[in-house]
Image (tube, rainbow, N blue to C red):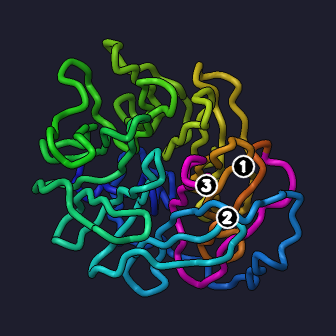
Amino acid sequence: MPGLLILVLLSFLPAACGSSTPTASPTERVSRTDSVVPSPTAASFESPLAVPSTGQILFHSDINEGFDIYVVGQDGASRRRLTTAPGDDVEAEWSPSGEQIAFSSDRDGNYEVYVMSADGSNQRRLTNSPGTDWGVTWSPDGTRIAFASDRDGEMELFVMQADGTGQRPLTAEVDTSGWAPDWSPVRDEIVFVSDRDGDSELYLLDLDSPEPRPLTSNDRQDERPDWSPDGESIVYMANKENTSLFDPDEIYIISRSGDMLRQLTDNQFGDITPGWSPDGDRIVFSSNRNGAWDIFVMSASGEGEPLQLTNTPAWDRSPSWSPRTAEQ
C-alpha cells in the first residue's frame, strides 16, 4: 500500500470513496464543482438544532493556500487559526481533557504526528520516521496516541505514549494493517479501516482479543469511523452504491455490535468526515452540498436541516468537537 495513501481516509478522504486502496495524498485535491449556489451563512441558516454557544470545533482548511488547523465555535462564530507553519497541517484531534491537540503535518518533509496546546502554542513533533504517520486518536485516559504509519512498508496501526516515547506496532500478535483508527472513549477498543478483504471495511479490535472483528461487509467503501461518547455507536462515511454522482459520500451510523445500520444523509454531492458532539446528540461533518467544503452540524437522528458553521470558498474538512471536559 503506497505511502501517499494518507488521507483518502480521514480527511480529504476518499474525496471519492470509489477506490478500495487509499492512494490520495493530503495535498491532492478532488475537483470541485464549478457552478454552485452561494452557501448561506450560519446566522441565516434556519435549523431546528438548539446549538449552544459554548464548545469548539477543530477542522483543517486551505483558505490560506496550504492546510492549517482552525477552530470555530459550535454556533459558527469566533473562527481562529491555530497553525501557520509551511506545508499542510491536517487531521486534528482533541485530547480527552481538551487541553491538547494532536495532528499530522508535513512541515518537515513528510507527514509526522505533532501535538500542541489547545490555543495553538507549544507545537512539537512526536514522530520522526521515513514513512507517513497520520490519523491520530487518543486513548480514553489521554496517556497514549494511536496512529497509522507505513514506516515498515504497509499502512498499519501504531501506538505511543502521549509524549512520543515508546512507539511500537499496536499489537505484535494481531494483524492491524489498516488506517483511520479511533479509540473507544469507554473501552480498550479501537475501530479502524482495512482493505484486507478487498475493499475498505470497518473493523473492531479489542486490545485483549486475538483478532479484529469486521463490523461492515458490503460493496461500499467504508471510511473515517468515529465513536459515540457512550461507546455504543460508530458514525462513518461511505459512498453510495451504483451511482455516478460526483463525490457521492454519505454519513452512516452502525452499532458496536455491527447491526442497526442507518444512513443519515442523502446528498447529491458529498458528506464526509463525521464526528460526534460530546453529548451524543449531534454530528459535525464536512459537506460540499453548497459548492465548497464547509463544516455542518446535524441532529444525530439525521432529521431536520443541518446548521452550516463555515462559509468560505476553501476546503474545510475533518471536524473534531471539543470534549465535554473542555467546556466545563
Q: Mark 3 points at which residue?
A: 327
Amino acid type for the residue under numbered disc 3 = Glu
Q: Is residue 305 visible?
A: yes
Q: Report x, y in % for residue 240.
A: 64, 47
Question: Which residue is under mark 1?
Answer: 282
User: Residue 74 got which mark?
Assistant: 2
Q: Which mark is residue 59?
A: none
Residue 244 visible in this rendered orientation of the protein:
no
The CA distance from mark 1 to mark 3 is: 16 Å
Snapshot quadrant of residue 213? top left
Determine the secondary structure under disc 3.
Answer: helix
Going from N to C along the chain, the mark reached first, 2 or 1, is 2
Q: Which of marks 2 and 3 is nearer the N terminus?
A: 2
Rendered view: 94 above or below 38: above
Question: Label 3: few (<14), some or many (≥20) within 10 Å?
Answer: few
Magenta region? 302-328
The foreground one among 157 and 185 is 185
| Above or below 155: residue 213 | above
Distance from label 2 to label 3 (Cα)?
Answer: 11 Å
Res 41 quadrant in image? bottom right
